[in-house]
Amino acid sequence: MKRSFSLLVPALWALSVSALGCDRPDARLERMRPVQVLVVEREAVGSAAAAPTQAPPAAAPGTAAAPAAKAPRAQAPLDAAARVTRLSVAKGVERRQPVGEAERFERGSYERLYAYLEVDNRGEPGAVVVSFVPPGGGPERGRVRLDVGASPRYRTWGYSRAIDLPGRWSAVVRSLDGRELARTSFDVE
């Protein structure tokens, strides 16, 4: 029984290699041609349909593919014509909408508070900074940098876990060059 098994394995290997039409298991990979893949980038709500872009060609067999490059972060401040059309504070964000939106929050009823914003940006992509100003004007909390794409309704949000003092807080949106774009106040009790 043991002998027949030891003869069966090489025989099956030879049969599988000959069925592929090659004498080396990796030869089939060498005959494969790279495949062109179309990638469709997700656009913001209300923008035109995304234009397909071609992905880089596949790596040759036996070589490692280069890691995918991340999209470059916007280095420019938001266009002067862009405006924040909505700024609210909420306990969460689901399906790109604020959840638990309020002007008053009870301490301990949240893990994070979110600054949710919609931006009308018909110019070039840019970035903003969202921060939370504590009661009495102490050092800002959060300071989250958010990229803003070109869209008439670009939605984005940032959060902070460090909103713990009772009193009147402010969520502030600024351009990268420090220009205040929007501000809203909320109470923590």
Image: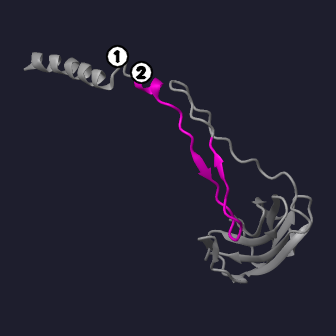
Q: Is residue 25 left or right of residue 58?
A: left
- Residue 168, compared with residue 40, is above or below; it is below
Q: Determine if residue 140 is in view.
A: yes
Relative image position of residue 164 (x, y in whole percent): 71, 71
The amino acid marked with disc number 1 is Asp
Does residue 33 belong to the magenta stretch? yes
**In this figure, what is the number of numbered marks?**
2
- Left or right relative to 157: residue 176: right
Residue 23 numbered tag: 1
* Residue at 63% over, 40% down: 68
Which picture quadrant has residue 85?
bottom right
User: Disc 2 marks which residue?
Assistant: 27
Answer above or below: position of 94 versus 3.
below
In the picture, which quadrant includes the C terminus? bottom right
Characterize the local packing of mark 2: few (<14), some (14-19) or many (20 or more) Cα atoms within 10 angstroms: some
Residue 137, percent across and down? 87, 71
- Residue at the (65%, 68%) spot, across then down: 112
User: Mark 1 to mark 2: distance in Å?
Assistant: 8 Å
Q: Closer to the camera, 99 or 6?
A: 6
User: What span is in magenta?
Assistant: 27-55
Which type of secondary structure does the marked residue at label 1 adopt? loop
Report the magenta stretch's main SS: loop
